[in-house]
Amino acid sequence: MSDVVTVKPDVHDMVVVHRTFRKSCAELPDLVRGLRPGDTARAALVVDAVRFMLMGLEAHHVSEDEFLWPRLAARTAVRAEAITRMEEQHHRLEELVTQVSAVLDGLAVDPRQPLCGQVAAQLTELGSVLTAHMDEEENTILPLAAEHLSVAEWEELGEISLAKLDKKHLLRAFSALMAVATPEEQRTLLTKAPIPARLLWRLSGRRSHARWEARLYGA
């Protein structure tokens, strides 16, 4: 295979995926900080949102670790330092995810200070590191992926990421993606999605996600 592909993949879908993480990172710290002692029903809802974000982040990053970095490293020697930096950032993010995950059970059953403040601070740090990581990935790595990966390889990366999610979460993940996409991006995502996913999103996914967000944000 040539180092430079002739038909370039559309890597913009990763920007949309990143947008879901940016939204969660901006909102979750305040949601956690706003929990009240004894309100375990509200705490369970917010903790579920945190867990969902962390689950998606893990699937997204593991697929990059296993599939994307090795291929780019083999084909873009002049940018090896950027790929190494991506890997190092993933290690730091794994540490932060582990820290947050370790206290979520306690937060769900006893949402009181100082634990709420602690988790909110951890999520804020996670968001800061993740945002910087995604900024660099979009500016540096995605152009490399478009230049050096085939369309089939880019699609395989997405399939690997989806395969790491439990099937029961797939519609929720797709609905979250569609919720932050522009109309044009939605049309592209629907074109790429399997027919069952399109039907489920139109029949129930869109409405169920809107109801879930209304509960989470109190709107």
Image: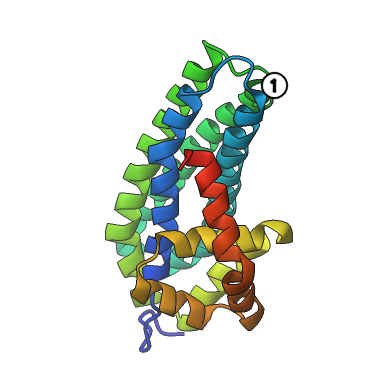
Secondary element at image label 1: helix
Which of the 4 image quarters holds residue 138? bottom left
Q: Which residue is mark 1?
A: 109
Name the residue rendered at 46%, 82% in the picture.
151
Percent x, y of residue 126 = 44, 34
Q: Is 44 left or right of 67, judged from the image as shown? A: right
- Front-lying residue, 61 or 211: 211
Name the residue rendered at 35%, 44% in the picture.
131
Q: Residue placed farthest to the front in the image?
A: 219
Q: Residue placed farthest to the bottom in the image?
A: 6
Q: How many callouts does the rendering have?
A: 1
- On the rendered image, what quadrant is the C terminus found in? top left
Using the rendered image of the protein, determine whether residue 193 is visible from the camera's viewpoint. yes
Q: Mark 1 belongs to which amino acid?
A: Val
Residue 169 position (above or below residue 124): below
Percent x, y of residue 64 = 51, 58
Percent x, y of residue 136 = 30, 52
Using the rendered image of the protein, determine whether residue 81 is visible from the camera's viewpoint. no
Give neighbour class at mark 1: few <14, some 14-19, many 20+ (Cα, 10 Å).
Answer: some
Q: Residue placed farthest to the top in the image?
A: 114
Name the residue rendered at 59%, 14% in the picture.
37
Name the residue rendered at 49%, 83% in the picture.
191
Percent x, y of residue 203 = 62, 72
- Front-lying residue, 101 or 172: 172
Residue 52 position (above or below residue 197): above
Residue 4 position (above or below residue 83): below
What's the coloring here?
rainbow
- Front-lying residue, 201 or 15: 201
- Front-lying residue, 197 or 97: 197
